[in-house]
Amino acid sequence: MMNHNGNAMRIYHTTSKEQTARIGFSLAGLFEPGDVVLLKGDLGAGKTTFTGGVAKGLGIEEHVISPTFNIMKCYFDGRIPLYHIDAYRLEDQPIEIGLDEYIEGDGVCLIEWPAFIESLLPDERLEITLKHAGGDCRDIEIQGVGERFEALVANLPEVIQ
């Protein structure tokens, strides 16, 4: 499926937190060092749950928590490092705090509330939007921006078990 910009897009519907995490787990095997994943969605949409699935998929044993008050949490014990950034508190703040060293760095970087650090975002990225669909159900839109990520999304299965 393509979105209105012509970018490859896939939509998954989950009915539990475990299924939402499973989508992240499945995508983790496709990530390479330097990949940037934008996580969009309202508060409580499942961004941290999704990130926990990515962490497990990378072989990270540590429990993933939201980095809201830390801005960034780093996990190094997986296949590649995972950098989990929550940019919510950076709105209208100077952003010269070194985040650019982690974005497109030696691991995969997942960014919640990416609009608040727009100037730091690369042109090529994976954009994931999580939307409430009642109870623990979520609609997860995965969109590839740039050649690598458009190909990645185009090759995703219709259903992730």
Image (cartoon, rainbow, N blue to C red):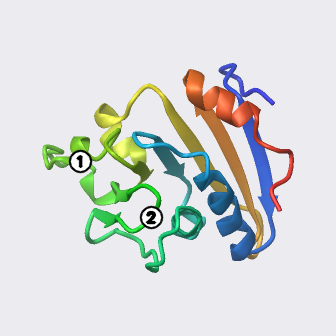
Helix, strand or loop under label 2: loop
Q: How many labels does the image show?
A: 2
Residue furthest front in the image: 79
Q: Closer to the camera: disc 1 or disc 2?
A: 2
Give the residue type at disc 2: Gly
Residue 89 location, x and y as percent?
28, 59
Viewer can see residue 115: yes
Residue 55 location, x and y as percent?
51, 66
Please tell me which residue is depicted at 33% across the width and 54% down the height of the picture: 87
Q: Mark 2 points at which residue?
A: 78
Q: Mark 1 points at which residue?
A: 99
Viewer can see residue 113: no
Q: Which of 90 and 49 is in front in this view?
A: 49
Please tell me which residue is depicted at 45% across the width and 64% down the height of the picture: 78
- Disc nearer the start of the sequence (1/2): 2
Q: Tell me if mark 2 has few (under 14), some (14-19) or many (20+) residues whose alpha carbon lies within 10 angstroms of its own.
A: some
